[in-house]
Image: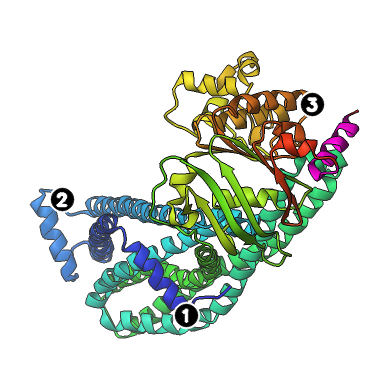
Amino acid sequence: MASINSTSSIKVIFTEFLGFPRQLCTLLLLLIIQSVIAALALLSIVPIADFLLDPTLTKHSNITDYDLCFIKALNLPFNFWVLGIQFIFLNILKGMMDVALNYSTLKIKYSIIRKLIGNAFDTFFRSRWEFFSSTNNGELLNTFNKEVIIIGDAVGQLTTIFTNLLQVSILLAVPMWLNFHMTLLTIGITALFALPFLLLQPISYRLGKQNTETANIVMGVLNEALQAARLILGFGRQINERDRYFKAFDKHTNVTLRSQLLNSGVNLFFRPLAMLAAIIAMGFELKKGANVSELAAVLWSLLAAMPIFSSLMQGKVSISNFLPSYDQLNFLKKKAAEFEEIEGNIIFYKLEKGIEFSNVSFTYPGREQTINKININIQKGYMTALVGESGSGKSTIADLVLGLQIPDEGEVLIDDVSISDLKQNSFRERIGYVPQDPLLFHTSIRENLLWANSKATESELWEALKLANAENFVKNLTEGIDTLVGDRGARLSGGQRQRIALARALLRKPDLLILDEATSALDSESEQLIQQSIDEISNNTTILIVAHRLSTIAKAKQVYVLKNGNIIEEGSYKNLIKKTGGILNSMVLKEAALQD
């Protein structure tokens, strides 16, 4: 993936940062207030130093004069306890403002993270299915789960750098006013100490890139293990899978440790060096006979500024560390944009005639041709079936109808209008789709149904369950329709999941129902129940069925038999099974023999 340079990435993130003007104004206001209070807290050390050096105040700083007038105006005595309380109060107030600043910074950070995730999510889901099928799931999951957070941390770091620069400007104004030479000398020595740390940026970037790559692998292995839990248990390979995960995890941990050590090391080593610079500068000024109380205030100011200098240095290194995360997000968004759906302007309202494939060809990248110049007619109000061996192109045709793939040649026409001219979701919202592996969400049956049609009434929910032959088993569940189905519906049997998926599709009252091998993995009893549902629905619904078991297509008005992407036989089910020596006839006889 192509990398972007530090300057352009900072520019991009500051552009995101400036996209929240209201929060930015709040931050700036808090920053100004905090800086003023911080300056007062720093100056409050001068009267204390003067009082300790000479309680009679025969020789003292001008700052002490101002403070003396302020305390007398409050009718308070000018003594150590009042000065101490003043010092403590101002520092507590500064601490409260620090917390408010931190909260404001975090709020901007998470607002930007939310925006980044939202933009990525929208970009990914504007793309065709091909984007998801060609992208590693671990890479996608890690990008959302970790890399965007790293980007957010960098945004927070940049926000902190921005606030720190303003804070330093104000904090340095105090020592500059009190003792220009000592302050300038401290800054110069600190800058010399900082030079070696700037050389760490290439190392930080390299570690950040390795961190992202190994995190992708860890997330991928974990995702595979969770998805294949049944298989792992069935094969008794739990220890092997655990070791595979730990191997990836340990590799990631080694890189992460080095990356985090570098970031923390910058702060730990730079801070004492910066303090040393302040002490060296103070030593020179003491030889010149400078005012001790003012030097104490200058030193206190510089020491207060040192953590900010250290944070600035650490932030600079962290920015280099975040670049690989931003690169990956940027790369995935660009890839998704390349697969962006072709979106037309025509809104689909209702299926009037049917769907037609006109000389359609399609090939998956890096594979042989999947379907070859096929012509199919899916008539409104009838069942159309696709049969054939695995890999013959049946499910690909279903994907083309859904618009998940686009033809290499030819056209898919919806009521004589090219599918590419339609607003895709306006058409898909009129489709009910039941895939071979019915994915249910980890929530209740009710919520799974409402996911397809949020406006459905209670009676419509139960009507859909009844049509799908799911009403009885749902009623017999302990929590009924509010029963949690588990991850991907794991708490239900295969037949129950399939019937809930069918009910979900029917709840939309679709113009077109697509059943993609909906009974292929079911036992005979579950298949029979699904079959009964299909038979009842087929009386008034347009159905496209990708058939594994031929008993499900007995009412098909048109059957297309496919082989190697070509249609080798077509006609009504009734006519084709009567055709002696015909392909469908042979398939039916073979299936019947296997059942016997």
Q: Which residue is pictured at 54% across the width and 82% down the height?
A: 199
Q: Where's residue 347, x and y in %? A: 39, 48
Q: Height in image: 92 above or below 506? A: below
Nearest to viewer (mark 1 / mark 2): 1
Which quadrant: the N terminus? bottom right
Q: Where's residue 526, x and y in %? A: 73, 25
C-alpha span from label 2 to label 3: 96 Å
Q: Earlier in the sequence, mark 3 or mark 1?
A: 1
Q: Height in image: 347 above or below 564? A: above
Please rate how many residues cluster around mark 2, counting C-alpha atoms within 10 Å: few if below 14, some from 14 to 19, many from 20.
few
Question: In this image, 545 relative to 430: left or right?
Answer: right
Q: Main secondary structure of the magenta part?
A: helix
Q: How is the image coloured?
A: rainbow
Indicate the secondary structure of the residue bearing disc 2. loop
Type of amino acid under label 1: Ala
Type of amino acid under label 3: Ser
On residue 507, which mark appears?
none
On residue 194, which mark appears?
1
Q: How many marks?
A: 3
Q: Which residue is mark 2?
A: 77
Nearer to me, 100 or 580: 580
Q: Which residue is mark 3?
A: 524
Residue 306 lies within the magenta run:
no
Nearest to viewer (mark 3 / mark 1): 3
Residue 592 lies within the magenta run:
yes
Nearer to me, 32 or 216: 216
Nearest to viewer (mark 2 / mark 3): 3
Question: In this image, 3 relative to 21: left or right?
Answer: right
The span shown in magenta is 581-595
Q: Which residue is pictured at 86% across the width and 35% down the height?
A: 589
Please rate how many residues cluster around mark 3, counting C-alpha atoms within 10 Å: few if below 14, some from 14 to 19, many from 20.
few
